Image (spheres, rainbow, N blue to C red):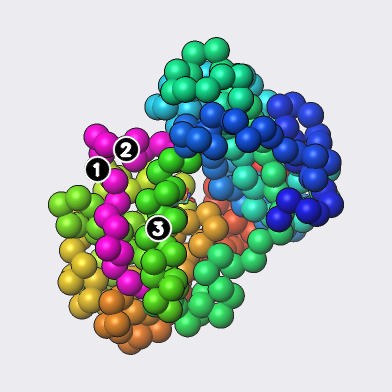
Amino acid sequence: FSDRDGYIWYDGKMVPWREATTHTLTYTLHYGAGCFEGVRAYETSKGTAIFRLKEHTRRLFNSAKIIGMAMPFSEDELNEAQLEVLRANKLKEAYLRPMVFYGSEGMGLRAAGLKTHVIVAAWTWGSYLGAENMERGIRVKTSSFQRQYVNAAVCRAKANANYLNSSMALNEVLKDGYDEALMLDPEGFVAEGSAENIFVVTDGVISTPDVTSALDGITRRTVMKLAEDLGYKVRERRITRDEIYVADEAFFTGTAAEVTPIRELDNRAIGSGSRGPITQKLQATYLAQVKGQREEYPEWLSHI
Ligand code: PMP
């Protein structure tokens, strides 16, 4: 992925893609102390726009605050950097990856004296869990790795180190032929996917776990709002895995995954075993919203 044309915004400068490198003694490479975002830009009738840019940048700054990292740029500067990366790479639709990391000014765990670096990369990225799965739904397996415990990890931060857990969970189930992992919290209740929040639909009511151990997803918040606007009841509550087995519908939400139906959990078909009607409605509404095809919430789109 490093050997390609394009530009990466690196500490305030637009750097050719292949030259956006860093030293092997980079603190974050050793200890995982960094944070990042996953953001999407869509083509709208008024040109390319980043969806909920300000909210993503805000979460990045909150993540940095949680892990005690000083940010060398302002939120406005990073918002502008993300728009600039799309322009420099002439991208109409893209996934953006801002990331904040400590440099290689010293070794050992002491972070004092280290510089904070920031990159923003962007590239074209289709459906994260497969285009055909947006209709068919995916096959999910409960992971043998649990989601982190709130006081052993910083669950509210989108911190690099948290993703060892997600990576192990996902790659374990991929090897067994599934599409995504479901992670349970340390008490055994449903938390989220390896990079998505989860929703279930039973008797027309939409439920999702709270964000004690799951990431406070921006797509989650968006979908909850859209669902309420459409007149659905949305509840945040504890959910068990066997409750999902017998739910009418289930789906994942995430910036990369958008709204992805779940057709199976642990080899049990959920509902009809394909995308359910409420999932379909929310998926269509979400995609229309991000592509600027709805009149509601124009403030969610930042045009380049
Ligand atoms: N949970 C985890 C662990 C994630 O990595 C992501 C992706 N950022 C999500 C949930 C979904 O968050 P969002 O909707 O903000 O992309």
Q: Quadrant of residue 92?
A: bottom right
The magenta stretch is 140-159
Tell me the kind of residue under disc 1: Tyr
For the point 50% across and 35% down, which residue is it? Answer: 30
> Residue 83: horizontal and vertical position, in percent?
73, 39
- Mark 3 vs ligand 1: CB under 8 Å? no
Q: Is mark 1 within 8 Å of ligand 1?
A: no
What's the residue at 51%, 77% (across, down)? Answer: 133
147 displayed left or right of 299: left
Question: Marks 2/1: CA distance?
Answer: 6 Å
Q: Main secondary structure of the magenta part?
A: loop
Indicate the position of residue 48 as horizontal and vertical percent values.
74, 51
Question: Which residue is pictured at 33% across the width and 57% down the height?
Answer: 192
N-terminal of the two: label 2 or label 3? Answer: 2
Classify the position of the C terminus by image quarter: top right
Mark 3 to mark 1 CA distance (whole Å): 16 Å
Mark number displayed over residue 168: 3
Identify the secondary structure beneath mark 2.
loop
Q: Which badge, 3 or 1, comes first in the chain's sequence?
A: 1
Q: Residues within 10 Å of mark 2 (few under 14, many from 20)?
A: some
Contact? badges 2 and 3 (CB < 8 Å): no
Residue position marked by numbered label 2 in the rendering: 153
